Image (spheres, rainbow, N blue to C red):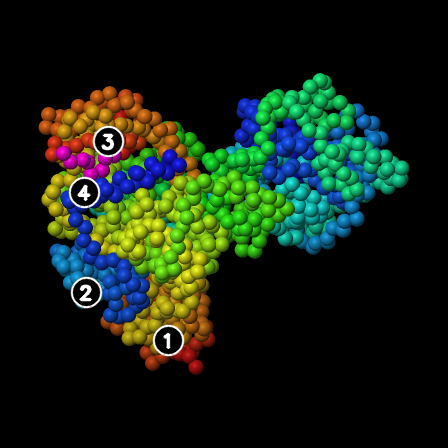
Amino acid sequence: MLSPWLTTVPLHSAPHVTGYERFHAESPTAEGGAILFSELGCANCHGGSAVTVPRKGPKLVDLSQRIDRDWLAAFLRDPDSGHEGSTMPAMFHGLADEDLDAVLAYLGTLGKGLKLGTPRHANAERGSALYHEKGCIACHAPTPDFHPPHGGGETQVSPLVITHPDLAAKTSLLALAHFLEAPSRYRTDGRMPHFVLDTQESLDIASHLLDYQSSDPRDAKPVAPWPKADAAVVAKGKELVANMNCAACHAIEGQKAAPVVALSGSPKGEGHCLSSDPKAGLPAYDLDEGQRASLLAFLAGDRPTEDRDGGLTLAAMNCYACHDRDGIGGSTAETNPFFIGDEALGDSGRLAPPLTGIGYKLQRGWLEGVLTGAEGSRARPYVKTQMPLYAAHAPALAEWLERIDAPPDAKLLVERKEDLEAGRKLLGILGGTNCITCHTWDGQRSIGIQALDLASLDRRLRPEWFRDYLLDPASYRPGTLMPPLWPGGQSTVPDVLGGDTERQIAAIWSFIREGEGLPEGFPDHGSGQFEIVPTDRPVIQRTFFEGTGTKAILVGFPGGVSLAYDGLGARPVLVWRGPFFDAYHTWFSRHAPFEKPLGGDLSAIPETGAETGRRFRGYRLDEAGNPTFLFTDGDREVSERFAVEDGKLVRTLSWTEGSAPAVAHPDGVAVESTGEGKSLTFIYSWK
Amino acid sequence: MKRIASIVLLLCGTLAQAQESASAYTVAELLAASSPQDSRSKDWKPGDGIALEVSGMEWIGPDRLAVAIRKGEVWFLDGVLGDPSAVKYHLFASGLHEPLGLLRDGDDLLVAQRAEITRLRDTDRDGVADEYLTACDGWTVTGNYHAYTYGPERDGQGNLWGTLNLGMGELADNAKGWHGWGGIIGKGGRFEPKSLGMRSPSGLGANLAGDMFFTDQQGTWVPATPVYHLRPGVFYGNQESLGSLDLPEAPFHLTNLPKPNQPYPDALAEAPQFVPPAVWLPYNKMGRSATDIQVIDQGGKFGPFDGQLLVGEFTNSAVSRVFLEKVGGEYQGACFPFLDGFPAAVVRLAFAPDGSLFVGMTNRGWSSLGNRSYGLSRVRFTGATPFAIREMRAKADGFELVFTEPIDSATLDGALAMSAFTYQYSSAYGGDEIDTTELKIVSATPSPDGLSMRLVVEGLRPFYVHELRTTGLKSKTGRTLDFPNAWYTLNRIPE
């Protein structure tokens, strides 16, 4: 079967660096050159990159258990034919086939004999869902037959995608799963970042990528054993690898990179790396004209020594695939529909947050925690796309972002101890600024939409940024649903702290930081506060009800007998004894989850099979508040009254013509029936 | 940083103007949220605690207002035209499932619930409903919270219109059952679908000619707030509602579906049944989420705006004003800011028999600039004329502005500017103004009495919103406009 990934591959294509292609390919600039200088590995031999995290090749270990030898041989001879757009340069031009064999023989000895697991079950379909949901498609192509849940995604695959090599030729199911479970084992530079995937998820995604349709992973073909080589050949290979300075880019046990050869000015003479025909021993890149011009512009100019605005590093590491910073980057028209999450929160419920001023926004420790995957560091559980981890580089990245984003004139937030309680009021809904209408608090659901949790803000944000953000949310988070609650800097609650905007914001911060208990008016869900207890009359409430459906009409009779009537099927569905139900969700929750009976003594009423054709017409209440449900059944009109007498449920059916309607009774109750003519009464009693 | 500064200035300006316009209108709070107490007590009345979350209002007597609240009840409020503290509250109906509309029909009240429109009857006339009869059903109820039901409202022919929100999130299934559609209560109480392509059509209302209108809310497929003419056989653009076209009861089919990701005017040209809003209410400039529509028909008792539509505004706790005219047989017109500073999100509007406006509010499920969670306010016209652009009419070569007071032509120099923009037709959640172009005002000629002014404008653009900005324009008595700007949706340029 053809892999869904196979597309027409041009015979040769230039090395693909997404951040360069997306922002710099149209016209050659030194900045584009700076990205290529890092991402093509030039800086690994020559030094002098401004990109914060250096680009490296994969660690060369366990190759013989993970990579097909024939594929690797072809790849080394011509990287682009093995993997379209590969940034690995051709290194073997001018070398004989036996030299390549010797290099492979040596590479095959590296590692300590990796043992791959023997999982029992693989599910490519689940893998596809994970692949498209977790964020893989930010860099790689979606499968053509996958449709994002809310439309879109039918447009052409973006030219920005990093293609996969022919994975079936390159590797095996288990080896690919092993790789995906922890890419950082082999890819140390974060360009293929580390997603938090468990063993099963990794295997499922690998199954999807290989289009592996069997559910038993043990049927999958392993990597073919590499031939044994004699020691002399291995030694020759080792020497060749050392001579070629492979260790400049690749971590190889027992090999060290050669000293850096710094460059000054533009390359001179013939046969240099950027020429169309590099000398033997030098890397040969199949650069296109724009790439060559960009690199030359970079080499000829004043080379930056540090990435001062983030543009180089974010392009190099492709952070821009998901994140916007200073109006640059973020999802593209092609990838946007694949970012899914909580639609009720608008685009900020599904898209990655912008990185504009991120080093000012987040405390350094928190930022580092996000990059290392520290516990609790996922602030947005509703965003399905996962932020991958960059653990090895987290301290450096966090330090760097803090440095470049420090605002010159951040205004301090001045907290006052005595304002703490005002903070509770302001966060609340009783004359406050209603924060908890939309925001969850320490994991407890809010009243309306379930936006970012507020209780941990003090551990995440810098207080100065918090202040600036509250004054004008949309300028920090374009498209946010958060309204400006201090429009024009003026408070909308003049009676709290004298309407002093600065004090109000500081008070909110204080309460988040050290307040105890809940913001004012936060609904207390657990207490059953909204349990309906019928006392002197039956209570009727319509709602969504588990087991009854979306047009449930609940009747609670005084004395603890309750009934759920289905207004779609026009029939009683459930009778129970004990407490009636808690109407919290019906009355106050925006999300309107289905309610449940509170009582435990449930008696279901089965369908009779004669309900088809019934049409519910409503109900009447008698003086005591007992309901009579009305429905039509063909031409006849039927009414069905319910009342409780002496702890027994009395059900009376009346109809206008024909024989009696089919009736089913609650399970497990005693039934007495009486009646004549066009009326029948059933009395249900419990032991 | 420049951009932030200008936003702040803009907002300051709005607040200042609201204070100025207060002289023409006064707002009195009848009731607003105070404490969240249990409302199940027999003796509870709105005002004791939770929750007069107004979701429907209908005048049913000279001094009696019926109010539906989202908790599921209908209350009668007596004495609302008198002292607010003496208003009497009385529970008429209960146990409803999130009612979002209320209409009088003879002696009965019709109320929209999630799964049906219900006729509430008080057969023994004891002041409490004793019959809850199904007046209309026939749409799918998935159990998704966002699939709200709105209506009914009566048009000039007596049709009772309702609209069905799109579901969103868990359990949502818009592929069937008329979500994103509007329709009427048909024969035998079946919902009769008429038109599609809505997202969150939370407000309906007819104009004086009896034509029905509805508002939609910014969100997926809806770049900014639109006000549409509601009528059979048209598509309002939201493609999440297309699934029901496959049902046998579908009243018509779309001959052409507009392709997304192109400017609105181009998308409109691709599909004849796809219609533009009569008026766009630009995001933030006019508010963020429109709700109810209420025509002004008060014979001057509510100021000089009879015949125009008032539109509730949720997030900004405000009320906007819309002027409509027919050009080439279709409605189009302009919108103007009108009233703001209400204590909660404005959801329902109703005129009292004395010409005052009742404003029903609830923040439920969302947030607004109003910092109370619900409320009911009454707006009265004081008799002082507001200084406003009363009408903005399209002309073949520009616009005609009609003012409530004569303008001082000496203040015209440099006082007017105009730009035009449109939106991207796209599935995105909201959208920016795009292709904004500054237009040249060639001439501005006031009428001899100063009550109107002709603008000749170069480069009018069909289907674009034309933003008129005034600075320093004064009345002959030296007043500045209550609100300086207006937005005309120029779908068609008159011949």
What is the C-alpha distance between the residues marked 2 and 1?
A: 28 Å
* Residue ID for mark 4: B21
Residue shown at 49%/48% (left/top)? A362
Which residue type does callout 4 highlight?
Answer: Ser
Residue located 21% across and 53% down the image: B377
Q: Which structural element holds mark 2?
A: loop
User: Which is more N-terminal, label 2 or label 3?
Assistant: 2
- Stretch of the chain drawn in magenta: B478-485
| Residue nearest the viewer, comparing A415 with A637 | A415
Q: Are marks 4 and 3 in contact (CB under 8 Å)?
A: no
- Residue B169 vs residue A319, the one in the foreground: A319
Q: Are marks 4 and 2 in contact (CB under 8 Å)?
A: no
Same chain, labels 3 and 1:
no
Amino acid type, mark 1: Gly
The mark lying in front, picked from 4 and 1, is: 4
Q: Which mark is residue B470?
A: 3
C-alpha separation, residue under disc 4 versus residue under disc 1: 57 Å
> What residue did someone put label 1 on?
A560
Q: Residues within 10 Å of mark 2 (few under 14, many from 20)?
A: some
Residue at 40%, 58% in the rendered image: A511
For the residues marked 4 and 2, what is the alpha-carbon distance in whole angstroms?
Answer: 40 Å
Residue picked out by circle 2: B127
C-alpha separation, residue under disc 3 versus residue under disc 2: 53 Å
Quarter placement of the N terminus of chain A: top right
Residues under numbered marks 4 and 1 in contact, where contact means CB atoms less than 8 Å apart: no
